[in-house]
Each structure stands twice: as C-alpha cells, then as structure tokens.
Image (cartoon, coloured by chain):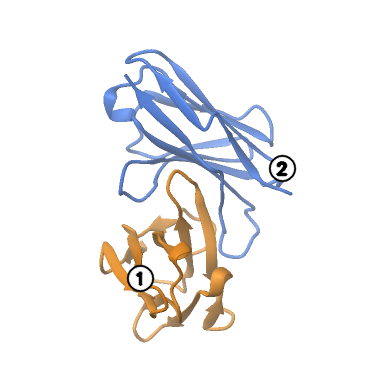
Chain colours: A orange, B blue
C-alpha cells in the first residue's frame, strides 16, 4: 500500500521568497507522484507529475519538484513566491491504475 | 476546451431531502470518480466507475449512490442528507491507459445541508 506524508499543515513565506513544500511517500513499487493545487472553492488542478522519466519535473506557474528515491521524497519548490500562489497544495501517489492516495495538504500563505 | 463540468456549483438542501449532483466530461475518459472533501481535509474517494463497472469504497455510506448512464455523465445521489454530509463534492476523470493515472478534476459542488 502507498502513503504520503506532507510535513507542515501551514507554510508561510514572504512574496519573492523561496517556496518549499515537503512530501515523502511510501510505496513498495515504483510510484507515480503528483502535486495538485486547490484554490478556495475550486477543484484540484495538476501542477506537475512524476512518471518515471526525468527526476526533476517542471510544472505550471514556475513550480518544480525533484523525485529522490533514496530519500523517498518529492518536494515542491518555487524560487520566488507570488501572492497568487496562496492556496492548498496536495501531494499524491499511485502505482498505476489504482486510487490516488493524497497527503493531508499544506496551506501556503504568502505575505506582502 | 476539454474539461470536467460539475453542476450546480453550490447546492443547498434540507436535512433528509434527496439531492443529486451532476458531473459531465468532454475528455472521453473511461474512469470517473467522486470524492468528498470536508474543510481543511484531503479529498476522500467515495466510488469510481471504470467504464460501466462500479467500484464502491468500503467505507462509503449506503446513503451515497452513483449512476453513470453513459461515458460523459456521472451522478452522485445522496438519499437522505445529514448535517455531516455538508462538504465539497469533487468529480474527476482519468484514462486507464494514461501513465500514472493522472486525474482531471472538476470545479466541485459545495453542498450545504440545513
């Protein structure tokens, strides 16, 4: 069975600062990993995904994530936060045609 | 643009009064999912359809039912809504042959139970 742990239910950064949202996964087989973003009263939007190709994955809105098998991590980063990045972020894992297993989410707060 | 559409975006119902939420997709995906998301929580999978095959999660209450009359549409029926069923309901779709089973989400329907 797979699982995902997101460290930090809330992360606060200043506008222009580095964004780092942590995600660690557990999987007995090679995983597929996703980061989704959710704005208030909206559905989930895919930011990026890892599907066993390049370990450094670039997504939309300037976000990227690096798959590190040795650390079982898939942390999400963005070099410079923007006010519009304030949202809830979910990391998720699957191992093929199976259910997505979501982390508990991290709320990103961006201050001016 | 190909997309997942949910109607209505906001639904208010009374305690015990049946309600139906609607989802449609123009992606021609063979899998459709229904999730329940409560405030500050991750989405919780209720059930999914793989083509016409219905797959219920073990902990989904009997109060929740679903129908998929064709590839494009899927409905969530709540037979007797309780106050605890107030939540955001998310529909998602995927292609079973897509790498990693990427899911595409609709905007959600926020259900209020009075």
B2 left or right, relative to B102? right
The chain to which mark 1 is attached is A
Q: Residue furthest bottom?
A: A70
Report which residue position mark 1 lands on: A25
SS at circle 1: strand
A31 left or right, relative to B94? left
- Foreground tag (1 vs 2): 2
- Quarter of the image where one finds residue A102: bottom left
Q: Viewer-proximal residue, B77 or B55?
A: B77
Which circle marks residue B5 in the picture? none
Name the residue rendered at 53%, 56% in the picture. Answer: A45
Name the residue rendered at 34%, 59% in the picture. Answer: A105
Binning the other alpha carbons within 10 Å of mark 2 as few (below 14), some (14 to 19) or many (20 upward) gives few
Q: CA distance from mark 1 to mark 2?
A: 32 Å
The chain to which mark 2 is attached is B
Binning the other alpha carbons within 10 Å of mark 1 as few (below 14), some (14 to 19) or many (20 upward) gives many
Location of residue B96 in the rendering, given as x and y in whole percent from the top left corner? 62, 54
Name the residue rendered at 68%, 36% in the picture. Answer: B72
Report which residue position mark 2 lands on: B26
Location of residue B101 in the rendering, given as x and y in whole percent from the top left corner? 57, 58
B58 left or right, relative to A98? left
Q: Viewer-proximal residue, B42 or B29?
A: B42
In this rendering, the answer to whether B75 lies above or below B97 is above
Location of residue B44 in the rendering, given as x and y in whole percent from the top left corner? 38, 45
Location of residue A86 in the rendering, given as x and y in whole percent from the top left corner? 41, 61
Name the residue rendered at 31%, 66% in the picture. Answer: A6
């Amino acid at each position: 069975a797979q699982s995902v742990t997101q460290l930090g239910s809330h992360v606060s950064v200043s506008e222009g600062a580095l964004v780092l949202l942590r995600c660690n996964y557990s999987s007995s087989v090679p995983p597929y990993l996703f980061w989704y973003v959710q704005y208030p009263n909206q559905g989930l939007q895919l930011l990026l995904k890892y599907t066993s190709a390049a370990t450094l994955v670039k997504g939309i809105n300037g976000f990227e994530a690096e798959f590190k098998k040795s650390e079982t991590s898939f942390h999400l980063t963005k070099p410079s936060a923007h006010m519009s990045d304030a949202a809830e972020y979910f990391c998720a894992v699957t191992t093929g045609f199976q259910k997505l297993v979501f982390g508990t989410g991290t709320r990103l707060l961006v201050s001016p | 643009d190909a997309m997942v559409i949910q109607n209505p975006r906001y639904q208010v119902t009374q305690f015990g009064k049946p309600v139906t939420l609607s989802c449609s997709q123009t992606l021609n995906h063979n899998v459709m999912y229904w999730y329940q998301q409560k405030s500050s929580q991750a989405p919780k999978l209720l059930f999914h359809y793989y083509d016409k095959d219905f797959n219920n999660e073990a902990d989904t209450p009997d109060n929740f039912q679903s129908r998929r009359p064709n590839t494009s549409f899927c409905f969530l029926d709540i037979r007797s809504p309780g106050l605890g069923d107030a939540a955001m309901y998310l529909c998602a779709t995927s292609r079973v042959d897509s790498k990693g089973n990427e899911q595409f989400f609709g905007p959600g329907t926020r259900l209020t139970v009075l």
